[in-house]
Image (tube, rainbow, N blue to C red):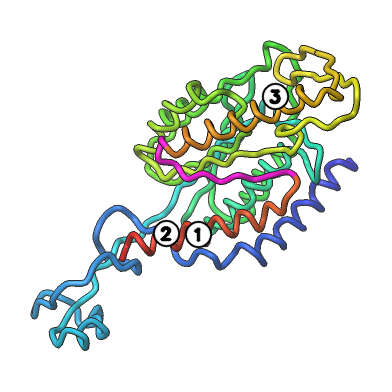
Amino acid sequence: MIALHAAEHALRRMDVVLRRRVDGLTHGDRPGRRIGTGGEVHAVRPYRPGEDDVRRMDWTVTARTGEPHVRVTVAEHELETWVLVDGSASMDFGTALMEKRDVAVAMVAAIGALTDRPGNRLGACVLTGDGLRAHRARTGRVATRALLRSLIAAGRPEPGPAAVADLGAGIERMRRERRRPGLRVVVSDFIDPPPGWEPALRRLAARHDVIAVEVVDPREERLPDVGLLTLVDPETGRRREVHTGSARLRARFASEAAAHRTATTAAVRRTGAAHLVLRTDRDWVGDVARFVVASARARRRRAR
């Protein structure tokens, strides 16, 4: 009961913070891939008497060229968003402000706030060692809050070989079962090497707009000098004692971690998906806001 109380309080606080800092960064519904009535400008062309609506006249271009021009807009349509949340045991780790699993749930809340428009729907798939568990896509804030409660209340997997989740298989299954074009968000620590998930992510990005959200903890990048330390693999349960007083060991660990991060970034870029890195020791809301603003600016540059 106390845990549910705390979860409800966290949801209310999260909702307030997101509405203040994230809401308003996106305006209107998602522009579609077809030409038609809508508010997103696609191009400007000369006015054709008898065919074009004078209400779509672009007076700025008309004044500059001396010839009447009209705006050609892109039709807007309802957006269906699906978030794949990595629920494997490796997400139950955090040495800073929160665990990686908490950041993943917070990201789902942010996606819900950013896509909260009339008719838009949000659904989620949770990947565990038992497979993919889907929460059907629904519209509205009430549905988003119910989804977040389900994610918070979900049990954590027990360490062991049976709990190992295949990220590539999870992405591929979501792609096959949710085929309607829309926004797809993959939230994971991407511990698996890129060859395991890169082909599936590339196929997903070929049909949908995809955001790969990588969740990182500072202790996954550098080992502290704390003497003899017992490390546990959360995926398999294996244990190993290491002497962190060795500068050579710490340097090798940091080098391997940096190489993995570099390989992950390069793999995401090759798939065509957008890449957002969230950390357990940083203000994730600010990182999401900056990502949204940068994406909007890039979209406007491409339109020009």
Q: Which of 136/73 is in front?
A: 73
Image point (75%, 33%), residue name: 222
For label 1, the residue is 294
For marks 1 and 2, give the CA distance: 6 Å
Q: Residues within 10 Å of mark 2 (few under 14, many from 20)?
A: few
Residue 178: x %, y % from top left: 43, 35
Q: Which of 211/85 is in front?
A: 211
Q: Which of 283/257 is in front?
A: 257
Residue 68: x %, y % from top left: 15, 83
- On screen, residue 73 versus residue 193, left or right, reads left
What amino acid type should be assigned to the residue bearing mark 2? Ala
For label 2, the residue is 298
Residue 97: x %, y % from top left: 80, 46
Q: Residues within 10 Å of mark 1 (few under 14, many from 20)?
A: few
For label 3, the residue is 252
What amino acid type should be assigned to the residue bearing mark 1? Ala
Q: Is residue 6 magenta?
A: no
Task: Specify the farthest residue to the left.
Answer: 49
- On screen, residue 2 versus residue 112, left or right, reads right
SS assignment at label 1 = helix
Image point (8%, 80%), residue name: 49
SS assignment at label 2 = helix
**Label pair 3/1, CB-CB below 8 angstroms:** no
- On screen, residue 217 versus residue 294, left or right, reads right
Disc number placed over residue 218 in the picture, else none: none
SS assignment at label 3 = helix
